[in-house]
Every structure is written in structure tokens, then in C-alpha cells.
Amino acid sequence: MAEQDALSRRGFLRTASLTAAAMASGRLRGDSAWGANLHDAAPLSEFGYGDVLMSSEAHENQLRETQAVLMSLSDDSLLKPIRQMSGLAAPGEDLGGWYHYDPDYDYRKDFDAGFAPGCTFGQWVSALARAYAITGDEATREKVLRLNRLYAQTISADFYIRNRFPAYTYDKLVLGLLDSHTWVKDPQALAILEQTTNTALPHLPGHAVDHDVRWRMDKPADDISWNWDESYTLPENLFLAYQRGAGRRYYDLALQYLDDKTWFDPLSRNENVLRGHHAYSYVNSLSSAMMAWLVAGSEKHLLAAQNAFAMLQAQSYATGGWGPDEQLRAPESDDVYASLTHTHHSFETPCGSYAHFKVTRYLLRVTRDSRYGDSMERMMLNTVLGAKPLEENGHAFYYSDYNYNAERVYHVARWPCCSGTLPQVAADYRINAYFRGPQAIYVNLYVPSTLRWNDGGVAFSLTQEGQYPFESLVVFTLTASQAAVQTLHFRIPEWAGGSSISVNGARQKAEIVPGRFAAIRRTWKNGDRVELELPLTMRLEPIDTRHPDTVALLRGPVVLMAVKRAQSDALPRVTREQLLSARRLSERQWEVQASSGSVTLVPFTSLGDRPYTTYLQAG
Ligand SMILES: [Zn+2]
């Protein structure tokens, strides 16, 4: 099974790069299901945050918890480092950690307190705005409006001059203001954005500067942290600003900041240049490439994103995570395998998953290839949904640990970058779950929830229920204000052989192919019921093709991790057969009989504080 799975994973990569190459030459036009879609059909649309009601406890807890933390932080505390850096009076409690401002901060002496003052402000405003679109909570709306007005009073050149990450911070501020404009309808958001842009631009490099490249000659050459800004991620939100009505200037700026020479150009030619690139920010930059396709029609950038994502898949862990020690790796290297013993910083989870969800959302919308949805599901269930909750004191989950001696712990520094992305991720589960085409709905994630939409004057809702991914059955109930035609597309995961769909008890003859969406087109009536059966088979996935005996055990989309009694305990000796015949003890607990005794396996979301290992040696 391991070999078969490795093959099918390689098959995906091959298909993806072949399609990319064929698209470049125009050969696929009209003759391939997903290549053709690119040119012949408009991209699928996203739904709004308020269109989906979530009823999954795990997803809703993460949203509630992150929002409660953001709402608990005083406006003065949130503004404090920005005011300090702008030379203004800055009353209120200092949040500390990365958010703290210290004019004498020296990265070489202290990584924790003062590394990135104010950097997460824009992400928090963005997350609050998205949450308002979900909940309609008036206090959340008022906080967004207040923060934007208070922030507008601070805008100054000094904030960027003193900032280690001027482009990063500007990028997040742009998004916070755009989300305020779109979801909170803040009438001043675009004007504040314009003022922000006017002030920031003279202090940005004017083009994409790669990570580790020195461009600020006024900063000490021996402090490399001044070379870690992320200007190459700017175009996504600049294109978005143009799309949302901020003006043509943002379109031109977006083109100006595309990281072509060293990154997108070689990627578009399918040259694997991932090695050594900072993991999160360069995966995040792929969303800029996708927006260059969606907004500016640049096929080169679409190819770059597709190729890069296939390369990323080839160096991912079974959980969907990537980038040990925040580095992308050379193709066919042993680095990811070696990371199982060399590091505990295996995957930067909230930031990485945020970047991953965005680029796969774009890719799925453009290609309609459901395997991008498989990748989102894997990432969601095995990484960020199991993040430790963000705390009011700034404790935040940062790295997932895939070491043989792993622990699920908070980051050493308070208020790191990942405290900015987790609240955004928690809001975004809704927009990852469903997409829309003409007279068509794409059900991408199987999470208990209700989607509401209108089409041709008919009001529809689709409710999904069940214990998936722990049980194989997902039940959908549809309501419609009158009978009407729609095509419902259901993602059939690539691992889900033997899947079936029934409508009102009648087994459908629609083509059901693992790794594709299955389409059911019919005149839907109020009360119609769909049953989707996705057999949750056990399988093993090797860490890479050179180490076929180093395997993770998966059941459907969920990685089952082996709990250890103590972190330092030796790995249990198991065989493939023993792993594949793991016995289920309860809904979320399995047991394997190894020669050395029994081993308990649970999903990442059920580990608690127990030590564990994701990979085992199966002889
Ligand atoms: Zn982070």
C-alpha cells in the first residue's frame, strides 16, 4: 500500500507538471477536464464569510478563542508599539513578546522581546473584520472602526524607518484595511490605506528583494535580521486593493513587486529553485503569482504557482506540513527525513497553513482540481486544527513537531507572527469549505456546516452532518424555495476508493473517481437528502522514496500519531502489517500490537500534552 500511495502521489505531481507544460504550449485547450477549464471557464467564486454557518465544535472553538483574545486586548495596547515608533505618547499596557518595541533591541542578543513590534496589528484587524462578517457582533465592528481611526493618527515615516519588517508590516496593514472596507464597510478604510501607502512607499525597496539580501544600507551589516523582510509577498494584497476599488496605482505596484527574476521565472519553467528559501513567506508569495493570473492574466505566474506547489507537495510531510526549520529543501534531498531527528521546528503551523489554504484556494478555483482540496483537508485536520489555543498573555502555537521525540508546545516567544495568522485561519474555514460556479456548488471540505445561497431567484441551503473524518458517512440535506436545477460537486479524495453517492436513497450512477469532484446535476427539491460514503481505509505513507520504511499511518485524511509514555522512549518496533491492522478502541483512538507491547495512536487534534511521534520505522 505504501508503494501504491507513493506512486499515486508522484502521479499527482507528474500530472500537475505535465498539465502546466501542456498549458504553456496551449495543447490542453479543450481536451482535458482541468486544463480546459483554465481557459474556457471563469474561476470558481468564493463565498462570503456570512454565507456559511459552522456547526463543528473544533472549528468554532478556534474562532471563538482567537476572537476572545483579540477583543480582550485594549486599543492602547494594540497601538502602543506603533505610537512609540512614530514618536507619539503611548499609554497602556505593553503586550510584550515580539509585539514590544525597544529602540535598543538587538537581534543578536535577544530573539524574543521586541523582534517584530506592531507586525501583527493589520492581521488582527483583518481577523476581527472577518469575524464581524461571520457573527455580526456590534462590539467587534466598533473595535475595527476604532482601531482604524486610532491607527490613522499614527501613520508616520518613522514607523517604517525603525521597523525591521517595513514591507511585511505594510502588507498586513493593507489587508486589515481592505477587510475593514469589504466586511465592516468602514467608509474611511480606503482613504487610510492611501495615506498608509503614501507614507510607506519611500521606505520600501521599490521591487521584490529576496530574504537574506541586504538592501538597507543604513542598518548594521552584521545584524542579518534587517535582511528578513518579505517584500516579495506584497503583490497579492496590492492586486486585491486594486480589485476592491483602491485604484489603478495598486495594480501597477503589484506588478512592480512580483519576484520574477529569482523565483517566478525559473518556477514557471519548472526549475526547482525551492532550496534554501524561507518556507512560509515563499509559499505565501505563490498567492501573489495566482493574483497575477487572476487579475493581470499572466500565464507565467499561474505556471509558477502550479509548478511550485507540486514541488512543495513532493517535500511535504504526511500531515501536509512542510519546511523544517522554516526552510524549503532541495528536490530528492534527505533533508525532510533528517529533520525527524534533527529538529523540533518541523512546520510553522498557523502561518504556513494560512499561506497553504490561500494558494490552494486560488489553485482549486482556477483549475477545479479537487486534489488541491485534498491538500487543504490534510493540512486542516493534521496541523492547524490541533494548534494550542492562543492565550491572552501572548502564548501562541508556532511549530508542529515531527521529531521522533515530539511535543506539542507553545512557542518560546509571546505574540509571534503565528499569533497574527491563527485568528485569520480560524475565520477562513468557512470560505475554504465551499465554492461556487454557474448553477453549481463545489463542496470542498466535509465539516458540519450549512451553506446558504441564492440562484435565479431561488433560495437554497445545504446542511452537512456526520462524524467525518472519523466515520465515513456525510449526510447532506438541501432546502430550496422552489424546485430548481443545480449541479452539486462533491470532492472525492484521492485515497477514497469505493466511494458512493445516494440521493434520497437511490445510488447515483454519476462517475465517481477518486481525485476528482463527482457532479450530481438534477432538479433539486426542498428536503432532498444526499448521502456521501467515503471509505476510510488505512494506508502507510513513507517520508520519501529513499526511506520506504519510515512511515506515517493514515486513516482517510487523518494521520494517526503514536503516543509515547515519555519523550525519550525508544521508538516501538512495528511491522507494516501491524500498523495497517490497528484496532479501533474509541472514536479517536487506535491501538497497534507491536512486538515490544501495545502502542496507542491518535490524531494530532487528540494528543493533548502527551509526547508522540508522527513517523515510525516499519520493517
Ligand atoms: Zn508564524
Image (cartoon, rainbow, N blue to C red):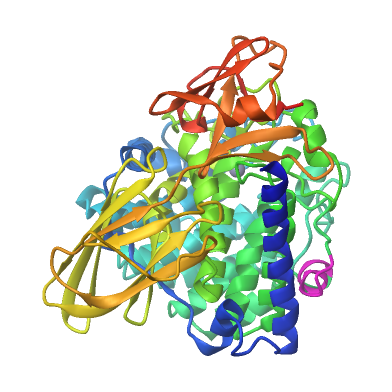
Identify which residue, 236 or 200, lies in the foreground.
Answer: 236
List x then y, in percent, for residue 169. Answer: 59, 55
Q: Is residue 44 magenta?
A: no
Identify which residue, 291 or 315, lies in the foreground.
Answer: 315
Identify which residue, 536 or 565, lies in the foreground.
Answer: 536
Q: Which quarter is ligand 1 in? A: top right
Q: Is residue 375 above or below residue 521?
A: above
Residue 119 in sight from this viewpoint: no
List x then y, in percent, for residue 615. Answer: 68, 30
Rendered-image quadrant of the C terminus: top right
List x then y, in percent, for residue 546. Answer: 84, 42
List x then y, in percent, for residue 360. Answer: 56, 62
Q: Is residue 272 above or below residue 600?
A: below
Q: Is residue 202 above or below residue 531?
A: below
Q: Is residue 567 left or right of residue 384?
A: right
Rendered-image quadrant of the N terminus: top right
Query: Which segment did they paint magenta?
Result: 262-271
Q: Tell me what residue is drawn at x 49 percent, y 74 percent.
A: 241
Q: Tell me what residue is drawn at x 70 percent, y 31 percent.
A: 111
Q: Is residue 330 left or right of residue 612?
A: right
Dominant secondary structure of the magenta stretch? Answer: helix
Q: Tell me what residue is drawn at x 51 percent, y 72 percent.
A: 368
Q: Tell me what residue is drawn at x 42 percent, y 50 percent.
A: 534
Q: Is residue 265 magenta?
A: yes
